[in-house]
Image (spheres, rainbow, N blue to C red):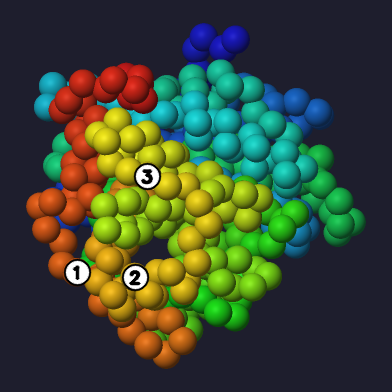
């Protein structure tokens, strides 16, 4: 059990240079970070240190074999200045699930939680108060140990850095349903938040961006007939009044926003189905008018309504968002809980 985390304060703060009214996503970084090393078979005590470059040997295994995993979380400040996290233990557990799959040593819970809280206390002023903004938190672990042998490193670094952030998407979100490339495969690392999963998405996403889409919707790697998830979010569709999302598998990230939305919707008597969702069904629903909504869900994306999708050289538009849209309703419910505006009957919120 660690009780006190050592804190090395930055000599100067950059905070006065930041325009908190015009925050992009993940663009500016707070004054401090948490740093923790794995050496000689164990994790050393984490420390809060100034946000600064790190020095690595060119033969560090992260550069060659991509042994790295990460998480995405947010801290919110309420009207009384209290600071809140949303289901942080789920992020901690998922980080270790990802680490295990990448043969990275798992972290003790108190190193993660006590370290994160100590970091947030030091950089509390960096947590935006403006609605729609928050402090995006990026915990990550990577192989800092050296060697060209293609085997797990013997040293690792766990770092948490934070970025006051606004919305992830700056405009409308149009998606392309992928027919050729795959994000992940059975038995692979799709369920892990492994850095390489994202690198592998960049090229197909660039091709989609050139065609005017913002994200790719990944389909299953075998038939490309079933919708799985998007590049940085899980996907929900509303067909008539029913909300449908794909089941998680070893190809899909078990999103914390996704599972919260499923629980929230059920508690509001919104019919929810977690089942395989074929592209054919979605296209037919778009053609016959029963496809009412499509939205992405994730920590960075929150709930991002999708305005249209492309598939096999055809474009399909979705109805305009209204106040009755599930996306608007569920976004308000979840952000109200996250920011301590309403009761949290689920026990998801944690005060820092
Ligand atoms: N799917 C992918 C590939 C993601 O990167 C993310 C973002 O973290 C999500 C889904 C949503 O997960 P969560 O809601 O836990 O942020
Ligand atoms: C998040 O939603 O926190 C993510 O990790 C997505 C990220 C790729 C921006």
Residue 50 drawn at (x, y percent):
44, 37
| Image quadrant assignment for residue 210 | bottom left
Query: Relative to 296, is 218 on the left or the right?
Result: right
Q: Nearer the viewer, residue 14 or 188?
A: 188
| Image quadrant assignment for residue 258 | top left
Q: Quadrant of the N terminus?
A: top right
Residue 113 drawn at (x, y percent):
49, 23
Give the residue number, with chain letter if any, for mark 1: 319
Q: Nearer the viewer, residue 82 or 43?
A: 82
Give the residue number, with chain letter if any, for mark 2: 285
Query: Would the CB of label 3 be found within 8 Å of ligand 1?
Result: no
Task: Give the distance between the C-alpha atoms of the residues marked 3 and 1, in whole angstroms.
Answer: 20 Å
**Residue 266 visible in the current orientation:** yes
Circles 1, 2 touching at the beta carbon (< 8 Å): no
Disc ID at residue 272 = 3
The residue at 43%/69% (across/down) is 281
Task: Give the distance between the C-alpha atoms of the residues marked 2 and 3, in whole angstroms.
Answer: 17 Å
Residue 21 drawn at (x, y percent):
13, 51
Q: Up-down: is 234 above or below 48?
A: below
């Amino acid at each position: 059990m660690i009780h006190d985390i050592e804190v090395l304060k930055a000599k100067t703060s950059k905070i006065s240079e930041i325009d908190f009214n015009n925050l992009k996503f993940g663009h500016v970084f707070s004054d401090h970070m948490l740093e923790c090393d794995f050496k000689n078979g164990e994790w050393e005590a984490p420390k809060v240190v100034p946000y600064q470059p790190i020095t690595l040997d060119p033969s560090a295994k992260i550069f060659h074999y991509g042994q790295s995993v990460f998480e995405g979380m947010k801290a919110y400040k309420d009207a009384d200045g209290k600071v809140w996290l949303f289901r942080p233990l789920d992020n901690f557990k998922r980080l270790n699930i990802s680490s295990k799959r990448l043969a990275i040593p798992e972290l003790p819970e108190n190193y993660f939680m006590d370290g994160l809280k100590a970091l947030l206390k030091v950089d509390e002023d960096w947590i935006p108060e403006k609605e729609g903004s928050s402090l995006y938190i990026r915990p990550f672990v990577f192989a800092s140990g050296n060697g060209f042998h293609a085997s797990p490193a013997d040293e690792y670094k766990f770092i948490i850095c934070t970025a006051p952030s606004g919305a992830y998407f700056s405009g409308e979100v149009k998606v392309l349903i992928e027919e050729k490339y795959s994000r992940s495969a059975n038995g692979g690392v799709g369920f892990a938040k492994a850095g390489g999963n994202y690198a592998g998405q960049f090229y197909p996403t660039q091709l989609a961006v050139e065609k005017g889409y913002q994200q790719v919707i990944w389909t299953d790697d075998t038939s490309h007939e079933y919708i799985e998830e998007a590049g940085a979010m899980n996907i929900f569709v509303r067909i008539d009044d029913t909300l449908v999302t794909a089941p998680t598998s070893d190809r899909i990230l078990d999103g914390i926003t996704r599972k919260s939305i499923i629980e929230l919707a059920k508690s509001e008597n919104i019919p929810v189905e977690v089942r395989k969702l074929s592209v054919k069904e979605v296209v037919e629903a778009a053609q016959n008018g029963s496809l009412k909504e499509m939205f992405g869900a994730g920590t960075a994306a929150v709930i991002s309504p999708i305005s249209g999708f492309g598939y096999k050289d055809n474009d399909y538009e979705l109805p305009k968002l209204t106040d009755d849209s599930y996306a608007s309703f569920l976004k308000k419910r979840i952000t109200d809980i996250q920011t301590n505006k309403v009761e949290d009957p689920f026990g998801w919120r944690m005060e820092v």
